[in-house]
Amino acid sequence: MVKEVRHRRNATFERRDWTHGSTSLPILSLLVVLAGLWQIVAPFLLNFTNDQMVMRHSIVSGIALALFAGLGAYGLGRWSRSAVSACNWLACLTALWLLISPFVLDYREVEPAFWSAIVVGLLSAIIAGVAAFTYQDRDASLTS
């Protein structure tokens, strides 16, 4: 009976080992969440609320970025590695959209929105891509 309790305790500890040996994975995802939150408040702080399309795009893109990255951080140790990696890849794709959106939606003349989207998109794409690739790569290396 003591062995069984000890086994259960170890299984619980392994399930809660949400970093899987790396403390950088949740930090990377949380940095992208912060970038998404910045993108949400940027129209108000940088004063481009007069252009409704650009303001809505910034807020919706920021919500999507923060949501996907937040789900990636939340899912560590709770969901499968492929699900967490998929959330981080979705955050990376959202960040890439932010990076190209000033050119696609043609709002380059709204400079605060342009630079916010470029900087947030570039940094978030790199960080979310590293998080997704690292977690996905860890999955492959642990199964072989």
Image (cartoon, rainbow, N blue to C red):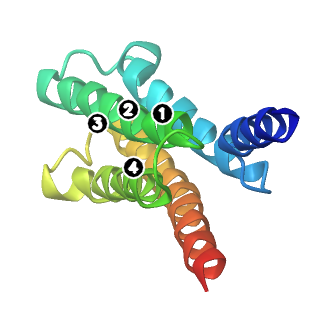
Structural distance between the alpha carbons of marks 1 and 4: 8 Å
> In the rendering, at what x and y percent does residue 135 appear?
58, 63
Residue plotted at (42% across, 61% down): 82
Can you tell which mark lies on residue 61?
3
Q: Which residue is mark 2?
A: 67
Structural distance between the alpha carbons of marks 1 and 3: 14 Å
Kind of residue at disc 1: Gly
Looking at marks 1 and 3 on the same chain, the residue that comes earlier in the sequence is marked by 3
Q: Nearer the viewer, residue 100 or 106?
A: 100
> In the rendering, at what x and y percent does residue 30 appear?
61, 36
Helix, strand or loop at mark 3: helix
User: To which quarter of the image does residue 116 belong?
Assistant: top left
Q: Are marks 3 and 2 in contact (CB under 8 Å)?
A: no
Q: Nearer the viewer, mark 4 or mark 2?
A: 4
Can you tell which mark lies on residue 128?
none
Looking at marks 4 and 3 on the same chain, the residue that comes earlier in the sequence is marked by 3
> In the rendering, at what x and y percent does residue 121 appear?
43, 51
Q: Are marks 2 and 1 in contact (CB under 8 Å)?
A: yes
Kind of residue at disc 2: Leu
Quarter of the image where the C terminus is located: bottom right
Residue plotted at (62% across, 39% down): 31
Structural distance between the alpha carbons of marks 4 and 2: 9 Å
Can you tell which mark lies on residue 87?
4
Kind of residue at disc 4: Cys
Q: Nearer the viewer, residue 13 or 125?
A: 13
